């Protein structure tokens, strides 16, 4: 008597032409975002601008980099096709890790500033005049 066992798998292979179109579209989007990031980054050095504008441009570059990371993870690592709980299992610890890096940078900067303002040489004060004159009351 033969027993047939059917395999149950959640793994799926990407569809042929449809997947190729998705990869090409994502590659074009990533290339355009990268070109925009490079132009913004080079403009900060090529043109004189206020510090606030530079800070704004750096923020835009960070946001564009996060958008690229989203596309890479979603398309090339196939996370965009997974169930919501699996996505949250991966994304939430990543957000905590990003917070962790920010907290360490903030604390490191605070420690550096405190270390630079600490006076290592103790202040020496002279004894009071009445104690050193030798007069007894």
Image: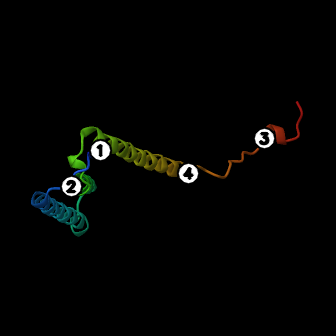
- Identify the secondary structure beneath mark 4: helix
- Identify the secondary structure beneath mark 3: helix
The residues tagged by marks 2 and 1 sit, at their Cα atoms, a distance apart of 27 Å
Task: Name the residue tied to disc 3.
Answer: 129
Q: Residue 8, position in %: x, y?
A: 27, 44
- Please tell me whether mark 1 or mark 4 is closer to you in this view: 1
Q: Tell me whether the residue at label 2 lies in contact with that at label 4, contact meaning CB atoms closer than 8 angstroms.
A: no
Disc number for residue 13? 2
Quarter of the figure with the N terminus: top left
Upstream in sequence: badge 2 or badge 1: 1
- The residue at 44%/50% (across/down) is 105
The residues tagged by marks 2 and 4 sit, at their Cα atoms, a distance apart of 56 Å
Quarter of the figure with the C terminus: top right
Task: Name the residue tied to disc 1.
Answer: 3
The residues tagged by marks 2 and 3 sit, at their Cα atoms, a distance apart of 91 Å
Disc number for residue 115? 4
Q: How is the image coloured?
A: rainbow
Q: Quadrant of residue 61?
A: bottom left
């Amino acid at each position: 008597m033969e027993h047939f066992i059917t395999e149950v798998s959640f793994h799926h292979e990407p569809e042929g032409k449809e997947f190729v179109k998705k990869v090409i579209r994502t590659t074009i989007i990533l290339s355009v975002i990268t070109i925009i990031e490079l132009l913004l980054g080079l403009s900060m050095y090529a043109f004189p601008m206020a510090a606030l504008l530079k800070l704004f441009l750096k923020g835009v570059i960070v946001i564009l980099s996060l958008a690229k990371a989203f596309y890479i993870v979603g398309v090339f690592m196939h996370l965009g096709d997974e169930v919501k709980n699996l996505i949250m299992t991966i994304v939430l610890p990543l957000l905590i890790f990003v917070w962790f890096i920010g907290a360490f940078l903030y604390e490191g900067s605070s420690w550096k500033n405190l270390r630079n303002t600490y006076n290592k040489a103790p202040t020496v004060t002279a004894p009071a005049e009445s104690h050193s004159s030798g007069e007894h009351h």
